[in-house]
Amino acid sequence: MKKSVTKNLIMFFAALVVIAALFSLYNIDTTEIQEIDAQKLVQEINEEKVEKVVIRGNVIEVALTDGTKQTLQKEPIESFSELVDGYDVAPEKLALFSREVKDEEGMALFMKSVLPIILPFILIVAFFWFMFRQVQGANKSAMSFGQSRAREMKPGGRPAITFKDVAGVKEAKIELEEIVEFLKTPKKFVALGAKIPKGVLLVGPPGTGKTLLAKAIAGEANVPFYSISGSEFVEMFVGVGASRVRDLFRKAKKNAPAIVFVDEIDAVGRQRGAGLGGSHDEREQTLNQILTEMDGFEVHTNVIVIAATNRPDVLDPALLRPGRFDRRVVLDLPDINDREEILKVHVRNKPLEKGVEMRPVAERTPGFSGADLENVLNEAAILAARQDKKRISLHHILDSIEKVMLGPERKSHVLSPEEKKVTAYHEAGHALVAHMLPHADPVHKVSIISRGHAAGYTLSMPESDKYLHKKSEFIADLAVLLAGHTTEKEIFGEVTTGASNDLEKATNTARKLITRYGMSDKLVPRIYGEKEELVFLGKDIREQRNYSENVAEIIDHEIDSLISAAVDTARKIITDNKGLLEEIVKTLLEKETIEKAAFEAIVGKKKGIEGIKEQPEKQTEVKETMVDDIKGV
């Protein structure tokens, strides 16, 4: 609408400019012309300076012998002869120059006589035409307000992405390949009484490839594909979203079999009755229309709806029941083998140095999503280009991993010698305790170079992907987290603010052990505290107590006990291995960074769990799937 108005305004003003140019066209002369009166002309005739005189209507054009041009206005009823006779000019003077009488040209006559009469009518007609176009455009926009904004991809206009470009997520690809095959050869399934699924819900953390899989379906399926975001249904006016849903499904049914992909469906599919507008707001009416279109009275529409979300917990139950979304495809974060395959996909168009393998990169990126891995390789390419390199090395990729995890190096952030020393002891404490505890992750790198908000960092990674975590592993993590704080206190007698993030992580981990994972010896295994999300306030999540004050006191005591035991463990390791601690600090102050090989050259190889003697008080091992656990120091 705005573009149309701007275009019409430009055209209108351009027409005015053209008209003004036509007015001035007949009067354009690059030579400067001087206006004179009759006395001046008579004087020049008497002085024999006039070479030629041209009478054009009421204008007398005078050309002098020196090339100067002049004009003179005369009375309409007065001729040139009458003009000069009034001043007693000698006849022999008039014979010294030529005289010529010319009629006005057709264009000039038109400009002067006809155009001033018809121009107002032209401008009035142009104005009304312009206003009519605006009203017509507004009506057209109003009529299309309720139409779907979905992008349609017809067979033959597919993107280049196929299932071959999607690494990992094998089970998800199998599920979706069945959908594509059903659309291509439905008779094979119908012969066995199978019905085409109504909907497929792609669920997974951000960056795991939900939208990429939808693009692959669009590239594989030989049917019309409609793509839209959930937020594009919702408008300020009630009923517009429902109208767009009807229009979208009308188009899809008209071209059935077809696929409709709704990205971020939680924007419109949230549980009804949870918003400020009760049950009649715009979003809920849109959801009601989606429910009706997916499984209403109409049957055999052959339209498959594929939706993606990373918040399945907030979706309305009616949306998730069979008959609407028959399949739920879960996309987890990739394991080490999947990460290796994903990295190989993203390095296809990137020149690598000889011998660069993706396995070490996959080992160093646990918990990374497909989008994170793509970002790592992109950052590596940028880093190599900044250094004027022709190929990407493994060093560039490993540096990019740390940049993605912690932020860029802050070379301008120069620590004082005292701060550098404190940071070296702090990180050395983390690394030493992590190396000595068998259940802690191995140390891959220690550095006192500032990155992001951290003055230094210790990079510890598990040797393999973990899906179940034991209590002993969390206890070891608590000791590693508190090792920096403990080292500062043991060496300097006081602590700095550098350990604040470690304390926050340690407190959260200890609280989860007691309240979420049932790993307390004094409390029964249950969940303490229910999380309540306030939908209409965005990301405001509160915890509602479902336990008494006595239980709260026990929880606090258990958290304090875990943290105290972790501090004692870290202190004992630091005290017993003070020589190794000093050696690590000395190397850090000299080189600023210690890689895994150099670190093990100082402290030796890490002992395995099988080489550690069990403590008299055996720790309880509770297996729990940890989706939201991100470990690191």
Image (cartoon, helix red, strand yellow):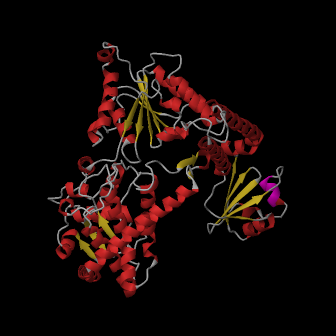
Q: Position of residue 524 (x, y in %)?
A: 44, 50
Which residue is drawn at the image coordinates 63% and 41% (left, top)? 275
> Is 465 or 66 nearer to us in this picture?
465
- Name which quarter of the figure residue 30 lies in: bottom right
Which residue is drawn at the image coordinates 77% and 40% (left, top)? 117
Q: Tell me which secondary structure the magenta stretch mostly adopts.
A: helix
- Quadrant of the snapshot with the C terminus: bottom left
Q: Is residue 606 highlighted in magenta?
A: no
Measured along the vertical axis of the image, is residue 216 above or below residue 426? above
> Is 251 or 234 nearer to us in this picture?
234
Q: Is residue 338 left or right of residue 517?
A: left
> Is 579 or 209 nearer to us in this picture?
579
In the orientation shown, which residue stands out farthest toward the bottom?
417
Q: Position of residue 479 (x, y in %)?
A: 35, 68
Looking at the rendering, the stretch of residues picked out in magenta corresponds to 79-84
Q: Position of residue 130 (x, y in %)?
A: 68, 38
Measured along the vertical axis of the image, is residue 356 above or below residue 179? below
> Is 480 or 194 nearer to us in this picture?
480
Res. 145 in view: no
